[in-house]
Image: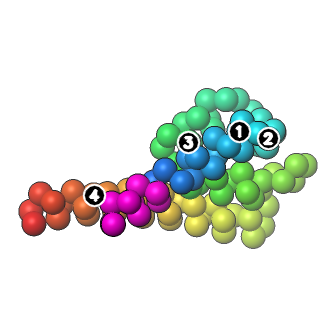
């Protein structure tokens, strides 16, 4: 059961970003090029998703919106940390 939860936690934001990218224009408006959201999709999916949520046309990301981006970074770091911890317990446990 734990593996399913970790898999959903890791793949969920990627699916959300891909759906926003395919069915909307928010990604094209928020980013200047296509490679930066693609890199974010592969490496920092939670941060990319939170950036897309916090970004607003004309203003970008301002004020309290940065809290969402910090939360995204924390979720990305937490997901990578959980993978490392799982590897360690499997290796030494």
Residue 11 appears at what percent x and percent y?
49, 50
Mark number for residue 88? none
Numbered disc in front, either 1 or 4: 1
The Cα atoms of the two marked residues, 3 and 2, are separated by: 16 Å
Label 3 vs label 2, nearer the camera: 2
5 vs 59: above or below? below
Q: Kindly identify which residue carries mark 1.
A: 21
Query: Where is mark 2, residue-wise?
Result: 24
User: Which quarter of the figure has residue 66?
Assistant: bottom right
Spatial CA span between label 1 and label 4: 30 Å
Q: Is residue 56 left or right of residue 53?
A: right
Calculate the distance from the C-alpha at mark 1 to the C-alpha at mark 2: 6 Å
19 horizontally vs 5: left or right: right
Badge 3 is on which residue?
Answer: 41
Query: What scheme was used to colour the molecule?
Result: rainbow
Disc 4 marks which residue? 84
Q: Position of residue 68 (x, y in %)?
A: 66, 65
């Amino acid at each position: 059961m734990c593996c399913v939860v970790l898999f959903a936690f890791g793949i969920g934001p990627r699916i959300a970003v891909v759906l926003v990218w395919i069915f909307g224009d928010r990604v094209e408006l928020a980013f200047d090029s296509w490679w930066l959201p693609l890199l974010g999709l592969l490496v920092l999916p939670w941060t990319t998703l939170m950036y897309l949520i916090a970004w607003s046309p004309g203003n970008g990301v301002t004020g309290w919106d940065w809290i969402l981006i910090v939360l995204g970074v924390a979720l990305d770091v937490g997901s990578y940390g959980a993978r490392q911890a799982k590897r360690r317990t499997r290796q030494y446990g």
